[in-house]
Image: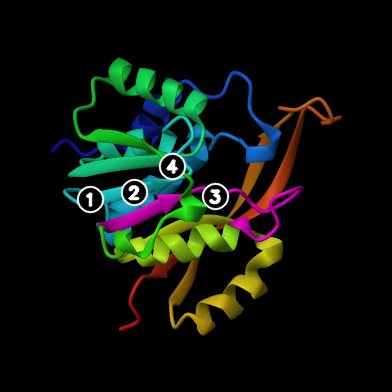
Amino acid sequence: MKKLKLKELESCLQQVDTFESPKLLLEQYPTRPHIAACMLYTIHNTFDDIENKTIADLGCGCGMLSIGSAMLGAGFCVGLDIDADALEIFNTNIEDFELMNVNMVQCDVCSLSDSMSDTFDTVIMNPPFGTKHNKGIDMIFLKTALQMAKTAVYSLHKTSTRQHIQKKAAEWDVKMEVLAELRFDLPASYKFHKKKSVDIEVDFIRFSAKKS
């Protein structure tokens, strides 16, 4: 398989269509191509957790992380999201990129049952951060992801919540490693946003699904 360079991957991801009318209640902020490329490149090259692996993308939105995973040689990738409009854009992206190894499921990630345990090698996600009306949803996503993954979960979380997440990881007997501190530039997507963009400090974290 051709090894994509980081810049090549980012350039490809810039072609991915994202939300036209993001929904505030679902905290729909697209993963920026630069951040998605950095995440996936690290997962692929440092941990070998993408190529030929089965991958779930929780809260996949328009499919940025799923499509990037497919480009890096994922065996099979499934995006899961509650929003039919986002999945419609995702489906268009799959067709535009002519990807055969990506699928999607419309579902509420927070309601997934234990029957999904150990279904995927790797789970990659940019979950809702749990602000506004969704307090605690980031932890529900994380707990679900850890049940689904055989090997590891890669996720973005606000740096301000790191201590809380460390406490939860210890409770769940899960190894947690902060791989990078990123600045997530959120463009003005909603009417109440006064600035053109806001930088949020975000941790890119790897969780080992089973403690060795």
Marks 2 and 4: CB-CB under 8 Å?
Answer: no
Which residue appears at 39% of the width and 46% of the height? 57
What residue sits right under mark 3 in the picture?
Answer: 127
Marks 4 and 1: CB-CB under 8 Å?
Answer: no
In this picture the colour scheme is rainbow
Dot 1 or dot 3: first in sequence order is 1
Mark 1 is on which residue type?
A: Thr
The Cα atoms of the two marked residues, 1 and 3, are separated by 19 Å
Dot 3 or dot 4: first in sequence order is 4
10 Å neighbourhood of mark 4: few (<14), some, or many (≥20)? some
Do we see residue 149 in this rendering?
yes
Q: Image quadrant for the N terminus?
A: top left
Residues shaded magenta: 120-137
The picture places residue 79, in percent across and down from the top left corner, at: 37, 40
The picture places residue 143, in percent across and down from the top left corner, at: 48, 66
Mostly what secondary structure, the magenta segment?
A: loop
Q: Nearer the viewer, mark 2 or mark 4?
A: 4
Q: Nearer the viewer, mark 4 or mark 1?
A: 4
Mark number displayed over residue 12: none
The Cα atoms of the two marked residues, 3 and 4, are separated by 14 Å
What residue sits right under mark 2 in the picture?
Answer: 56
Figure disc tally: 4
Quarter of image, res 146: bottom left
